[in-house]
Image: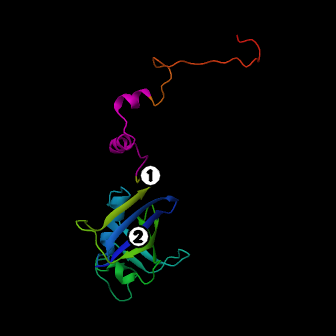
Amino acid sequence: MTILRFRIYWEEDDQTYRDIELLGSQTFLEFHKAIVTAFEFDGKHPASFYESNDKWVYGREFNSEVLVNKKDAPALSMVKTPVSALVTTTDQKFIYVYDPAKKWTFMVELIGVSKEQTPRRVYPFVLRREGIAPAQYGIKGVNPDKIMEIEEKYDLDADEMAEGFGNEGEEGTESVVEDFGGGDVE
């Protein structure tokens, strides 16, 4: 089974992206749900994928609200269309727009194709997260789970977090003040 790896960039910050792998047979609706989850959106709004070229020009639309593909319809169905049906080049691009009222726009680029599935991995799978996802509503706060990840990553305990990282002012350390002949110290 073919595995497609896409990088999904947030339009306003190309340092904020998610890499998602999915099976070629999975639909654009499954891809849409993976993107919503990866960027921590609530999934309550409609979305569209657009075919695109290297200049990020909007092409044919695939919408989450369209249930059946009809000839000459303004938009095709995400439910019925497998992603692999529209992957025609090794650098295939799509534009993804979530919540038409707010126009959360993401650039979607194919970055890899593989023939081998990773055992026990459930697809679609978020392979990589870079940058802080934009806040769908209001201001995004610090997630307590993220603080735990930082503590674990740097092997910090609660005492170190409260006291800081330095050892200034601790017993057994001395401060050295040198006089470089610059005059009287008051």
Do the residues bearing badges 1 and 2 touch, measured as CB atoms within 8 Å?
no
Q: Which residues are magenta?
A: 137-163
| Secondary element at image label 2 | strand
Q: How is the image coloured?
A: rainbow
Circle 2 is placed at which residue position? 6
Quadrant where the C terminus lies? top right
The location of residue 100, given as percent across then percent down, is: 42, 65
Instruction: Report the side of 23 relative to 139 (left or right).
Output: left
Question: In this orientation, which residue lies closer to the viewer: 162 or 64?
Answer: 162
Question: In this orientation, which residue lies closer to the viewer: 101 or 1?
Answer: 1
- Check the image and report above or below for 13 versus 160: below
Q: Residue at the left extreme?
A: 120
Task: Tell which circle, 1 or 2, labels the residue nearer the N-terminal end.
Answer: 2
Amino acid, disc 1: Ile
User: Total label count?
Assistant: 2
Q: Which residue occupies 73% across, 19% down?
A: 180
Q: Which residue occupies 39% across, 88% down?
A: 72
Based on the picture, tell me whether residue 88 belongs to the magenta stretch.
no
Circle 1 is placed at which residue position? 132
Q: Is residue 65 visible?
A: no
Q: Is residue 164 visible?
A: yes
The location of residue 11, given as percent across then percent down, is: 50, 63
Amino acid, disc 2: Phe
**Dot in front, 1 or 2:** 2
Instruction: Report the side of 81 relative to 173 (left or right).
Output: left
Q: Residues within 10 Å of mark 1 (few under 14, many from 20)?
A: few
The residues tagged by marks 1 and 2 sit, at their Cα atoms, a distance apart of 18 Å
Question: In this orientation, which residue lies closer to the viewer: 180 or 138?
Answer: 180
- Check the image and report above or below for 160 versus 89: above
Indicate the quadrant where residue 157 lies.
Answer: top left
Question: In this orientation, which residue lies closer to the viewer: 39 or 66?
Answer: 39
Indicate the quadrant where residue 7 lies.
Answer: bottom left
